[in-house]
Image (tube, rainbow, N blue to C red):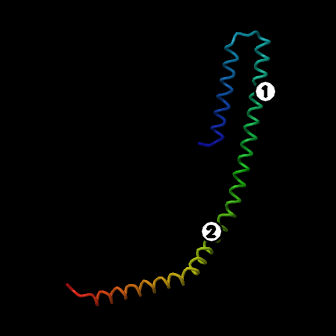
């Protein structure tokens, strides 16, 4: 469903509702005409406000889309660089830990050999 159809439906409903209320209330001809005139001016003002808000929203969404097209790839590249740097910084530590684990395993194997078997 398109937003224009939705907004057109809301505007039509508001106009029909306002017209129904105006025509169903007991008023003289002059009062009815002035009431219709003021109501139509109010509806026009509200529709122009809605239109300006929609244009503002459209421009905000457009700006956000453009900025995200620029920012997201740069952020992804920065993250890739940070991860690569972290890997290179932690590689020596990982190797050291692996050698310590190997030496612990060898020490355990030697201990098992020296322990008497039941």
Name which residue lies at 66% across and 40% down. 4
Is residue 78 toward the left or the right of residue 46 in the image?
left
Comparing 107 with 19, the one in front is 107
Name which residue lies at 78% across and 16% down. 33
Relative to 38, say whether 103 is above or below. Answer: below
What SS does tag 1 mark? helix
Q: CA distance from mark 2 to mark 1?
A: 52 Å
Picture coordinates of residue 47 (x, y %)?
73, 34
Figure quadrant of residue 101: bottom left
Relative to 40, say whether 61 is above or below. Answer: below
Q: Nearer the viewer, mark 2 or mark 1?
A: 2
Is residue 55 toward the left or the right of residue 100 in the image?
right
What SS does tag 2 mark? helix
Picture coordinates of residue 44 (x, y %)?
76, 30
Residue 60 badge: none
Quadrant location of the C terminus? Answer: bottom left
Which numbered disc flags the more N-terminal residue, 2 or 1?
1
Q: Which class describes the residues within 10 Å of circle 1: few (<14), some (14-19), or many (20+)?
A: few
Is residue 28 toward the left or the right of residue 90 in the image?
right
Name which residue lies at 71% across and 59% down. 66
Q: Which class describes the residues within 10 Å of circle 2: few (<14), some (14-19), or many (20+)?
A: few
User: In this figure, which residue is indicated by the disc labeled 2?
Assistant: 76
Contact? badges 2 and 1 (CB < 8 Å)? no
């Amino acid at each position: 469903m398109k937003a224009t159809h939705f907004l057109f439906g809301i505007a039509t409903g508001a106009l029909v509702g306002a017209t129904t209320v105006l025509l169903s209330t007991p008023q003289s001809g002059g009062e009815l005409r002035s009431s219709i005139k003021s109501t139509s001016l109010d509806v026009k003002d509200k529709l122009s406000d809605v239109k300006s808000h929609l244009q503002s929203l459209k421009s905000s969404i457009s700006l956000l889309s453009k900025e995200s097209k620029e920012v997201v790839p740069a952020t992804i590249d920065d993250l890739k660089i940070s991860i690569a740097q972290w890997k290179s910084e932690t590689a020596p530590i990982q190797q050291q830990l692996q050698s310590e684990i190997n030496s612990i395993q060898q020490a355990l194997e030697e201990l098992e050999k020296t322990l008497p078997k039941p």
